[in-house]
Amino acid sequence: MDFLTENVTTASIIAIVVAVIGLAFAWRQRSWVLAQPAGNEKMTKIASAIQQGAQAFLSREYRAVAILVAVVTVALIVLGLIPNSGMSSWTALAFVAGAVASGLAGYGGMYIAVRANVRTTQAASESLNKGLRVAFSSGTVMANLVVSLALLGIGVLFIIFTNVLNLDPATSASALAGFGFGGTSIAIFARVGGGIYTKAADVGADLVGKTELNIPEDSPQNPATIADNVGDNVGDVAGMGSDLFESYAGSIIAAITLALLGAGIAADKVIHAQVFPLLVAALGIVIGIVASFLVQTKEGATQEQLLWSLRKGVYGASAMVAVAIVVLGLLLDLGWGVIIATLSGLVGGVLIGYYTEYFTSGSYKPTQRLAESAEGGAGIIVIRGLALGMFSTLAPVLIIVIVTLVASWATGLYGVAIAAVGMLSTLGITLATDAYGPVADNAGGIAEMSELGESVRDRTDALDSLGNTTAATGKGFAIGSAAMTALALMAAFITAVKGGDAATATTFAAVLLEPKLITGLFLGALLPFIFSALSMLAVGKAAQEIVAEVKRQWNTIPGLPEGKTDPDYETCVAISTDSAIKQMILPGVIAVGVPVVVAVLTVLGKGNIIGQFVGSETLVGVLIGSLISAFMLAVMMANAGGAWDNAKKYIEAGQLTGKDAQGNTVTYRKKSEPHKAAVVGDTVGDPFKDTAGPSLNILLKLVAIVALVLAPLIYNAIKSDIVPPVGGSNTTIIVPTDDQTPTPDVVPATDLTPEVTPEA
Amino acid sequence: MDFLTENVTTASIIAIVVAVIGLAFAWRQRSWVLAQPAGNEKMTKIASAIQQGAQAFLSREYRAVAILVAVVTVALIVLGLIPNSGMSSWTALAFVAGAVASGLAGYGGMYIAVRANVRTTQAASESLNKGLRVAFSSGTVMANLVVSLALLGIGVLFIIFTNVLNLDPATSASALAGFGFGGTSIAIFARVGGGIYTKAADVGADLVGKTELNIPEDSPQNPATIADNVGDNVGDVAGMGSDLFESYAGSIIAAITLALLGAGIAADKVIHAQVFPLLVAALGIVIGIVASFLVQTKEGATQEQLLWSLRKGVYGASAMVAVAIVVLGLLLDLGWGVIIATLSGLVGGVLIGYYTEYFTSGSYKPTQRLAESAEGGAGIIVIRGLALGMFSTLAPVLIIVIVTLVASWATGLYGVAIAAVGMLSTLGITLATDAYGPVADNAGGIAEMSELGESVRDRTDALDSLGNTTAATGKGFAIGSAAMTALALMAAFITAVKGGDAATATTFAAVLLEPKLITGLFLGALLPFIFSALSMLAVGKAAQEIVAEVKRQWNTIPGLPEGKTDPDYETCVAISTDSAIKQMILPGVIAVGVPVVVAVLTVLGKGNIIGQFVGSETLVGVLIGSLISAFMLAVMMANAGGAWDNAKKYIEAGQLTGKDAQGNTVTYRKKSEPHKAAVVGDTVGDPFKDTAGPSLNILLKLVAIVALVLAPLIYNAIKSDIVPPVGGSNTTIIVPTDDQTPTPDVVPATDLTPEVTPEA
């Protein structure tokens, strides 16, 4: 395959050609969707209102963002003109291209979504399979737009920067990153603006409809209903499109940058490593197109069958991409390290999606338990939901940590970036299943508003419910891939900047050479979330036992309701005691155990395989990660809890006034609706401010004190390592003289290594 | 003052003497409180039930924890016996001492609290001032127990380890840390177990009382009411005592450790630096005792006057301690650096307390706004409360960051530890105001249960309400000081372990020499919290506008309620659009702006004062901090939101069953109570999963991509620094040969510094 690796041009051209094929496929799908019948007059009227609303929002949004884009473009040009800035004014070109491509991907996806919705409704009135085909096809339009525009942009810019302008590698990398920056600048506003829009309309429609005026959310009488449907499109479609455009482009750019800067790559493989991400992405697009034909179902399909029909597409594509990665890696002679790293990302992405579904779908225990807790009232279900959310961070964090460790163990920093590329390589199909969701949701809304028959509603409900599941998986995937991409970009940044000066080099060498530090930070940050989840759940459980006991006494002790007998206080005290003692064990043991386990692994792992993945750097990471994450959570919980408590008291004190239906001023008191709402807030706040929050205070010190006690052990265990002689095969880092922390180190006894002693 | 600094014995003895004085004062206060009348028979009966419950819980808790303490003690002895472990078996002695002291502090505080409560009720029946005196005096018992036992333990152990056993500095430091570890081991279970107990009883009593059976929380007919009152004591008193015992001891141990290891201290000041934290703590105890006499009020005092009477004590003590620190620092000839660092901690602690009150008290805007949002229903107030909590992380993080930067700028790592000591130096009085709260709360409960007259209830209510305010301040202070202590312990750990091997030294040097990295991590972690808070608030605001518009249309468009006219959809669409566009600006600009500002400051700050506080290490910190914190929050929000949504759907699908009052199985449907609760959960989840959560995806990539674009600029800006020659006045760090990430670095052009090139 020498023609591929002589220079990057061939691969860039292949990427461009595939991107054009992807765009052509998107156009074909678009035409097919638009050719479908759009239903009766009422339906088209509603659909057209949604189209106009969505169009109007996106125009306003893009106009607003255009100002930022213009400012940044000028700034980038100026920066490129500054002598010795090391940047090129051409970065501005990439930036604008990225912004336009990201905007186009979002716009195109939304354009087709607001037209596919009504056609899905109409198709669903014929058959379930037809409905699925229309909605899914519109998803493939956006998915292929996203991946193709990203790959096209990168391919073209890469040729311009390296072949036409002949920029040096560092400048080239920075300029290429401009493309990602452009995409992100659109994405941040698309996500935030779209997110606010969609939920403002949804929550507003819900609140006013269900709570006060009793108009159903999707009733044509609800003035907010069109805005609600518009929201689904501007938030979930356009926002999601720009988001994943950015992850996709970012991961490829990071991999290319690391290859350009030669981080973790043998000198004779630098070109191969630049070519690889482009070709993986290109193959992914082709495979995604093929796999999208796998998605169909038969009439009367169950929810499981519908889900499976979408899964066939995703899993089929993943399997094909995996094979393609192996073949491509071997053909390019990049070695198994690169292949393993890429595959680890691919597998990680699938797993994160699966676990997200586990935690959020009504088919599994976590959500079922959550539903059961609704019997305890609004406060309890909110607490349990927050705890569920915190607890669910476990799997994604562990998966990201493992992928990072495996990928960097297999092939260094480049491995982290290529793992991100691997994770996103099936985006052409995963995003299609994801973008399908809001279309199906809209289709249901339109069926309701147009008052179509029940059989149509049943079909659109089935399609909609499926969309909820795929949306959850898709959200998990989007977060996981964003994190991997960010890690990859970070690695690229550190590689680009390190060596700038000595102090920086020291810092960056530490972060750079030690995936253990970063994974330790992740694990440390995870600890407070799990710990808080466990202690909040414990309160819920124990409170329910108390409630049951009080009810039992009330119903069985004669004279108690009339106040003639004293209740049995002791049993309640005993229940509280038992349940608190029983349930403090697990969080307490986790808190003490995790730092001890990491310390023990550090000591045991020296010089063997464990030491490749765990070390004292991990412990430092856990230390810092848990400190920061626990501090944030503790402050948030304590203050939110305190504020809810006092807000309730504020109302009870008669300090809150409002207007009644006649416009008269009323003072809210106990038992008023606002007071009941405040009681829910206070109930949520109670375990926040008095259980989880304060417990975090200890957690954040605990890890540090355990580490300090075990410090000599760790010191002695790691110092027994072979210490290379000064001036040997290693190079040195200079510690700068302008350091502010003079440290004439009194070093623990029997020190063998040269010391870091910056001058005062 | 040479007699103080010849060796550490004199100062240790002074510390021991002062600790004994503190214990004597605690005993005097205890005796005074117990000498107060305990009220009528009904009151004593209730009080005695609370005493027994609290006693029973603490016994069970301590028995459970004793197992852990025994296991860890054996483990520490064994570790000390291992040849070359570098640890001493005497660490076990310190561990047991710490555990016993922490347990005693918690037990003693609770012992007096459950006896002071009823005496406060009785005293309040005479006068407000008497009630305040009794409750506050019981607070001083625990406060002085905590600080005195901690200082006593450290003083005695310090003499044993350094003078009697003559352990080397590193072993000595580790052994001393055992005292803190013992305290933490008790504290973690006291906080978690006590926290679960208190809220289980409280939430249980609340739920059953208010919601279903309509018994007031404090009614003697409520079987959970005694458990509720017990909970206040085991959670807030015993838990808080053990928590702050640990922070207090930990900060002193960290400062002594850093001094022992000579981190950041001139060689001739090593003893001075060990003596200083002991003497600051000792002076703090004496001043706290003096200041506690300032706390009294006149009859008929307003809430402000009551608060002021407590504030007098705290502010008076802070001012006196500040003077004492300056005098002591000058006498010991430690220089203004150490003095500034200590004062920065003291001021930081006061400020964190103040800001916590601002965010959580009903006297200020944030909580008042929160109360107003209750009109929107339970979902809205929960969302706003979470947003308030997230937003309120801003001030504490900034304060901790500034204190860390100032302290380490003033006097290096030792400065961070001594700042923590400074922050905690007034604990003898701040903890007293804090421990006062639960006593006043209990006093109110007892007044209610004993059916005392309204004038007594009014007084106990006033005292209780004051307790809520001081509890909020106290919680903020506890978290802030815990974070500073953890930072100090971490600095001590890193100092103790670095130099163990070369890779570790590199990592640790980076973290160690660069407070910028750590402060960057904090700032980075803050970003997603502020960002999420803003976007969630935006949803709330926009939703309320929609609700108002729908109501307006419903009331003004003729025929709409009857379904004869179409509503005006366009206005709702326009409102959503306007408000989304308007409110996406701030979070978007913050997200793009923060990394740009840090990068610009890095470039501008090179070689001047800005560069002392901000640098490329800050940017790396922001990068990693925001990645980790955004990832955690994004996963939590997306999954919690998804689960709430599906829990609601699960109920709507008729999959949730329960038992009615007659014990028959019922299936819950729409409009049932559990469904209404699930709707609240879903309302909270909406902005989680569709606004804030997905926006965080972009945030976590955005910082990295901005950094990557600006990489050449940063590289070129920092490389222009004077690079010291190899082998000059600096020492070298060796990069190990067993590194897994081979990096034949292609370094950006015009590189001047020697490169880090580990071998493959």
Image (spheres, coloured by chain):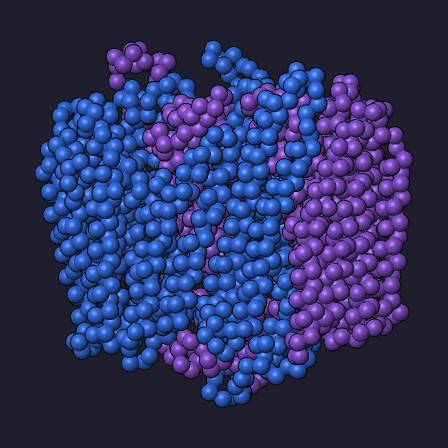
Chain colours: A purple, B blue
Tell me what residue is drawn at x 28 percent, y 37 percent: B465
Q: State which quarter of the image contains the N terminus of chain A.
A: bottom right
Is A619 drawn above or below residue B31 in the view shown? below
Direction from residue B397 to residue A163 in the image, left or right:
right
Quarter of the view holding residue B448:
top left
Tell me what residue is drawn at x 55 percent, y 64 percent: B597
Which of the two residues, B655 or B570, is positioned nearer the viewer here?
A: B570
Tell me what residue is drawn at x 57 percent, y 51 percent: B586
The spot of residue A100 in percent (x, y) is: 76, 55
The spot of residue B302 in percent (x, y) is: 23, 38
Is A485 drawn above or below residue B113 in the view shown? below
Which of the two residues, B702 or A575, is positioned nearer the viewer here?
A: B702
Direction from residue A45 to residue A715 in the image, left or right:
left
Tell me what residue is drawn at x 86 percent, y 59 percent: A16
The spot of residue A406 in percent (x, y) is: 65, 59
Q: State which quarter of the image contains the C terminus of chain A.
A: bottom left
Q: What count of labels does the image hold?
A: 0
Is B665 drawn above or below residue A65 in the view shown? above
The spot of residue A189 in percent (x, y) is: 65, 50
Quarter of the view holding residue A365:
top right
